[in-house]
Amino acid sequence: MADPQRRGLLLILSSPSGAGKSTLARRLMDWDPTIRFSVSATTRPPRPGEVDGTDYHFRSHAAFAAEVEAGEMLEHARVFDNFYGSPKGPVQAAMAEGRDTLFDIDWQGGQQIRNSSLGRDVVSIFVLPPSIAELERRLRSRAQDSDAVIAGRMAKSRDEISHWAEYDYVLVNADLDQAFARLVTILQAERLRRDRQPGLSEFVRGLNREFEAR
């Protein structure tokens, strides 16, 4: 829940495709609607039905490059002929309001954000499948991708999983309800960290003044 008495945090969720990251992200935002989902900026043109500011922040190549040069992108990457990135401004505004921002990104984007100027406010979580066989079963159960696409995702997952130790927390998503409960526990504990409560020092000074007045 939004709390103006603390700084908002940056919650990064990463996983190989099929491990359940996006489902956990949706559940978390349903649990706390004040959590802001980070909407990426991109230089690719909008597809039919996409809305600027909701699906993506659509930018020209020149505008995107200018934001990167000015340090206004927390992370960015080139994918084929277009660029994608996470604008810093909306995240900083949410932080000032005591709202958390959720990033559903890969390990490379997470690494850039952890190394950014807002890195000290990052909480990073990597989601693992209970087994590789289950990971493949989940990908196939979607009935959305061809065998070739699934094979490509499985091949990529090994490299993605190799970065698990770079994260603050790791969740093994064998049971979705249990994994979600643990995700909520992590978020609640991180919100209560001493260094995320800017009014705490003044509160303690008040307690000391009460001692002195006795």
Image (cartoon, rainbow, N blue to C red):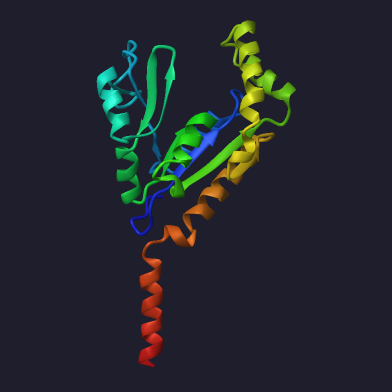
In-front residue for pair 30/163: 163
Whether residue 25 is visible, yes or no, is yes
Q: Which residue is drawn at 35% across and 71% down?
A: 202
Residue 23 percent coordinates (x, y):
54, 30
How many labels were placed on the picture?
0
Farthest residue, direction bottom: 214
Please tell me in which quadrant of the rendered image residue 70 appears.
top left
Q: Quick check: 48 above or below 38?
A: above
Residue depicted at 30% across the width and 31% down the height: 69
Q: Where is residue 162 in the image (x, y as percent from the top left)?
A: 65, 30
The residue sitting at 36% across, 78% down in the picture is 206
Left or right: 141 as drawn, with respect to 207: right
- Find the residue positioned furthest to the front: 69
Quarter of the image where one finds residue 179: top right
Whether residue 179 is visible: no
189 is higher (above) or lower (below) than 115: below
Quick one: quadrant of the C terminus?
bottom left
- In the image, taking residue 127 as reference, residue 208 lies left or right, namely left
Q: Position of residue 101 (x, y in %)?
A: 41, 41
Q: Would you place residue 97 above or below residue 47 in this image?
A: below
* Residue 50: quadrant of the picture: top left
Q: Where is residue 83 in the image (x, y as percent from the top left)?
A: 38, 20
Q: Which of 5 and 108 is in front in this view?
A: 108
